[in-house]
Amino acid sequence: MSYLILIIGFILLIKGADIFVDGAAKIAKKFGIPSIIVGLTIVSLGTSAPELSVSLIASFEGNNGITIGNVLGSNIFNTLMVLGVTAIIMPIVIKKNSVIKDYIINIVVSIVLLVLTFGRVLLNKEAALTRISGIILLILCTIYTLYLIKSAKSRKEEDSEEEEDIKILSCIIKIILGIIGIIAGGNLVVSSASDIAYSFGLSDKLVGLTIVAVGTSLPELVTTMIASIKGENDIAIGNVLGSNIFNILLILGVSSSINAIPISSSLLIDILFLIVISIILGIFMFKGKKDKLKLDKLEGLILVLLYIIYMIYIISRN
């Protein structure tokens, strides 16, 4: 039965993501909002909904392994698998100036997480995300959101395409239906995959880093792939960067504000790995042309291979 639910979840995810990207992209064109802003806000928040719901439930239940494992695992999956698989299918090319600030913020946020958690060790305290740390993350999340709003006001679409008859109500309905499909599909995938994983006796932390992380990141994978295929590369990159940023600032911020999250020493490696692969991603993307950012098939393959190696490592570690 769990396998049937898993398949149904995948179907809902794919269809929901398709409808969602279509609605979001049309609204961007209608109001002259840059696609990168749509990707960093509406799309990334919509596709992060499964991570938020899973982490909040886990936090309320005191299941810290799934809470922190879900976020770290999702961000690593987004960076390596989502962008890697998308680049293998179709190389990603966008304007460099549309994403460089958000790329830097993505790395800075990961470093902030490292400092808030393991900086306590330097003070001879247990590594953890305390309630104070959670509040700090939520303040940073508010600042980042305000930055996005300001960017949306100052950055307009440069491409002057022919006016398209876009009905706002229709787009809003598509976005709502898409989010419902994404969340419902993600929840079905996570619940069924978790049942399958627990039946094999896996630990909560391992389930959080692998099964739950992959399951809740499927919306990002499907949405990014479909956005890239449709030529909405700004949404594709913006979705991943925005999702990673909101996963740490919003999801861990809210979760640790509810209950302090103890962090095991083994997770230090996972946080450092997240920072390293983010730097590698930048090296791949910012090479070559000065005004263009590109992730080609070979680089996508390297990212996927790095994820496979990481999976082998954490499974053997646990």
Image (cartoon, rainbow, N blue to C red):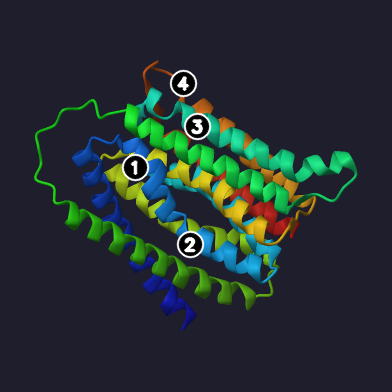
- Image quadrant holding the C terminus, namely bottom right
Label 1 near label 2: C-beta < 8 Å? no
Kind of residue at disc 4 = Lys
Q: In the image, is 182 to the left or to the right of 278?
A: left
Give the mark nearest the N terminus, 2 or 1: 1
Residue under numbered circle 2? 50
Q: Amino acid at mark 3?
A: Tyr
Dot 1 alpha-carbon crowd within 10 angstroms: few under 14, some 14 to 19, many 20 or more: many
Distance from Cα at disc 2 to Cα at disc 3? 23 Å
Q: Is residue 114 above or below residue 15?
A: above
Closer to the chain start, of discs 2 and 3, is: 2
Q: Which residue is mark 4?
A: 287
SS of the residue under disc 2: helix
Q: What is the spatial separation of the Cα atoms under label 1 and label 3, in whole angstroms?
A: 15 Å
Label 1 SS: helix
Q: Are marks 3 and 4 in contact (CB under 8 Å)?
A: no
Amino acid residing under circle 2? Pro
Q: Residue 103, which numbered label?
A: 3
Measure the alpha-carbon separation of dots 3 and 4. 14 Å
Residue that appears at 69% across and 54% down: 314
- Relative to residue 116, is residue 57 depicted above or below? below
Point out the tag, 1 or 3, that comes first from the N-terminus.
1
Q: Secondary structure at mark 3?
A: helix
- Comes first in the chain, label 2 or label 4: 2
- Identify the residue under disc 1: 38
**Secondary structure beneath disc 4?**
loop
